Image: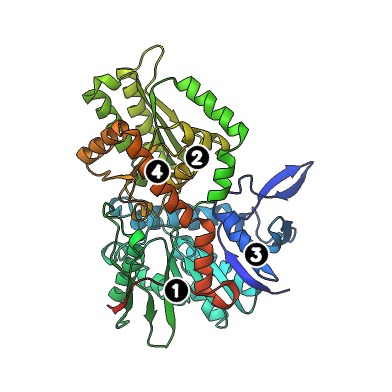
């Protein structure tokens, strides 16, 4: 039966578990995250499908299950699985997506690596995704494509199925033209995105950057803009904009709507988890182990965009200039490798270990280590307990599309206390102006921010946290997904979101 809603995303929407020699498909362990949010919309349509890839030694093997039927708490849906060889995965994902696209998206030209890119393979994989989506979609169905590694899918899909409503959501930053145009395939990528009906972004700045890239390559004339809502314009963020483009009119008559909705977290789920007795016991145990000192908590991936080394150096400077904090403040630095098969991240991990070791050697003792460097994923229930214990969440990426860790921290603080130190170059900063915003590229700014956080009076901490919790509650995962889908298919998923302010033209 053809599907009314098709979601195209590189990850499969379940976990595969081997039981007695047979694969079982189980729901993701944690209901928190993007995948469960997307699956929640399956209940809004009669039939839904998901398209993902799965590594396969031999894609031509007739025994490979290309289509599986899933039934879980979200309903019944089809999963079309694209069999990719290990070499295709390496080329399409590890090299083209991570070594060529990723550094450009985040503004690191010096990390860009063009030489090993196999563009025909990237095209081939994107074509396969588009074919699978086209095969699943009913007449006039909605297809929702996710993230930059599937940049070419909208264009291919429009060729195959001009009847479809196509939306593309960008989960990373979108860079300005002078950065994006480093990519030699820029025209092909932009034309593909312009084939969509909706292109979605986290914040207004990314939509404006996308428009700058379009205008550098194509003549699109006047573009209407609207004023940005007040609660999306943090004065301390480097990423705030006053107006945002809303749609692009092409000469063909096709209109591309630009949707701006920050991704949120499942606030109700996190609050429920934070309120359980098990979480309380874990938090009490962690606090007992830490003692009376203060705890700084940093959580992120091992990636040059996350600024992990800069943060550790800032912590070293803190202990150098404030002897009163030695033996009184700890840093729990969780830095999890994004993919252990990618050697590009090995030097970053080595640098983190060297700096952490030096700090512990300089300022530690037999009974006290100022830095705990964790290089493995922490179960979410334990992470929520750590969020409740941490006096300061220190989230200072050099560039970040959104950053959900800071929102998880806020949602976990049922006590209404705690301080968030947040990079002004994280997308979340535009809506979390009550955080202590800082510039991670400046040593002076980083030093000032961490001093301010550690010395902040309780009344100010609680006032800031109340504002932060209100902001995170307002734009949770459901708000994000419903707004994006209402732009795509307002008759199916609700009315089109209203823009705030007056329309202008740019």
Q: Secondary structure at mark 2?
A: loop
Return the residue found at the far top: 366
Label 2 Cα neighbours within 10 Å, binned few <14 / some 14-19 / many ≥20: some
Tell me: residue 195, above or below residue 54: below
Is residue 138 visible from the viewing direction of this image?
yes
Q: Nearer the viewer, residue 182 or 79?
A: 79
Q: Residue furthest bottom?
A: 252
Q: Which residue is mark 2?
A: 414
Instruction: Find out whether the residues at labels 1 and 2 contact each other: C-beta distance under 8 Å.
Output: no
Q: Is 1 positioned to the left or the right of 55 in the image?
A: right
Query: Marks 1 and 2, how far apart in space?
Result: 44 Å
Task: Give me the C-alpha separation between circle 1 and circle 3.
Answer: 26 Å
Q: Residue 280 in the image: state x and y as whole percent.
A: 57, 31
Q: Is residue 58 left or right of residue 477?
A: right
Q: Which residue is mark 4?
A: 465
- Please tell me which of labels 4 and 3 falls first in the chain: 3
Look at the image and tell me in which quarter the C terminus lies.
bottom left
The CA span between labels 4 and 3 is 34 Å
Q: Position of residue 231 (x, y in %)?
A: 36, 59
Q: Residue at x 38, y 84 (%)?
A: 250
Q: Earlier in the sequence, mark 1 or mark 2?
A: 1
Labelled pair 1, 4 in contact (Cβ < 8 Å): no
* Residue visible at 62% across and 55% down in the picture: 12
Query: How far apart are the two marked residues, 3 and 2, measured between alpha carbons?
Result: 31 Å
Q: Which residue does the numbered mark 1 point to in the structure image?
A: 192
367 is higher (above) or lower (below) than 237: above
Which picture quadrant has residue 216?
Answer: bottom left
Is tag 1's residue or tag 4's residue first in the polypeptide sequence?
1
Neighbourhood count class around disc 4 (C-alpha, 10 Å): few under 14, some 14–19, many 20 upward? many
Decide: few, some or many residues near mark 3? Use Cα within 10 Å; few <14, some 14-19, many ≥20. Answer: many
Label 3, on which residue?
42
Callout 4–callout 2 Cβ contact below 8 Å: no
């Amino acid at each position: 039966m053809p599907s009314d809603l098709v979601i195209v995303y590189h990850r499969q929407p379940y976990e595969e578990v081997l039981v007695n020699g047979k694969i079982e498909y189980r729901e993701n362990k944690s209901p928190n995250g993007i995948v469960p949010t997307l699956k929640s919309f399956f209940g809004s349509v009669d039939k839904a499908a998901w398209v993902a890839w799965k590594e396969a030694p031999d894609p031509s093997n007739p025994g490979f299950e290309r289509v599986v039927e899933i039934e879980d708490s979200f309903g019944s849906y089809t999963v079309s699985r694209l069999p990719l060889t290990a070499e295709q995965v390496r080329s399409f994902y590890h090299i083209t997506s991570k070594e060529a696209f990723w550094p450009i998206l985040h503004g690191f030209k010096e990390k860009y690596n063009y030489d090993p890119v196999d563009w025909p393979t990237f095209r081939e994989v994107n074509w396969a995704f588009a074919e699978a989506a086209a095969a699943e979609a009913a007449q006039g169905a909605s297809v929702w494509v996710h993230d930059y590694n599937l940049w070419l899918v909208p264009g291919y899909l429009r060729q195959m199925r001009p009847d479809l409503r196509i939306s593309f959501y960008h989960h990373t930053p979108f860079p300005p033209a002078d950065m994006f145009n480093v990519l030699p395939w820029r025209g092909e990528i932009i034309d593909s995105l312009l084939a969509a009906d909706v292109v979605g972004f986290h914040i207004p700045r990314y939509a404006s950057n996308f428009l700058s890239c379009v205008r550098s390559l194509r003549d699109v004339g006047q573009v209407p803009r609207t004023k940005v809502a007040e609660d999306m314009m943090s004065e301390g963020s480097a990423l705030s904009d006053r107006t945002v483009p809303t749609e692009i009119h092409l000469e063909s008559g096709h209109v591309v709507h630009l949707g701006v909705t920050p991704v949120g977290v499942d606030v109700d789920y996190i609050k429920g988890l934070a309120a359980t007795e098990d979480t309380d016991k874990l938090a009490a145990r962690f606090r007992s182990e830490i003692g009376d000192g203060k705890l700084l908590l940093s959580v992120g991936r091992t990636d040059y965009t996350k600024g992990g080394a800069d943060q550790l150096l800032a912590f070293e400077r803190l202990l150098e200039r404030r002897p009163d904090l030695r033996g009184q403040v700890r840093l729990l630095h969780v830095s999890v490798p994004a993919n252990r098969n990618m050697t590009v991240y090995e030097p970053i991990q080595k640098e983190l270990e060297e700096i952490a070791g030096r700090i512990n050697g300089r300022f530690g003792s037999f009974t006290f280590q100022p830095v705990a460097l964790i290089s493995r994923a922490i179960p979410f229930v334990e992470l929520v307990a750590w969020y409740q214990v941490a006096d300061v969440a220190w989230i200072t990426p050099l560039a970040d599309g959104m950053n959900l860790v800071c929102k998880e921290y806020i949602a976990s603080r049922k006590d209404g206390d705690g301080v968030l130190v947040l990079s002004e170059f994280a997308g979340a900063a535009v809506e979390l102006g009550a955080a202590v915003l800082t510039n991670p590229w400046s040593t002076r700014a980083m030093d000032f921010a961490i001093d301010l956080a550690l010395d902040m009076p309780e009344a100010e901490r609680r006032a800031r946290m109340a504002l932060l919790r209100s902001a995170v509650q307002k734009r949770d995962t459901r708000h994000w997904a419903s707004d994006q889908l209402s732009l795509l298919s307002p008759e199916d998923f609700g009315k089109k979101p209203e823009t705030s302010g007056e329309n202008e033209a740019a």
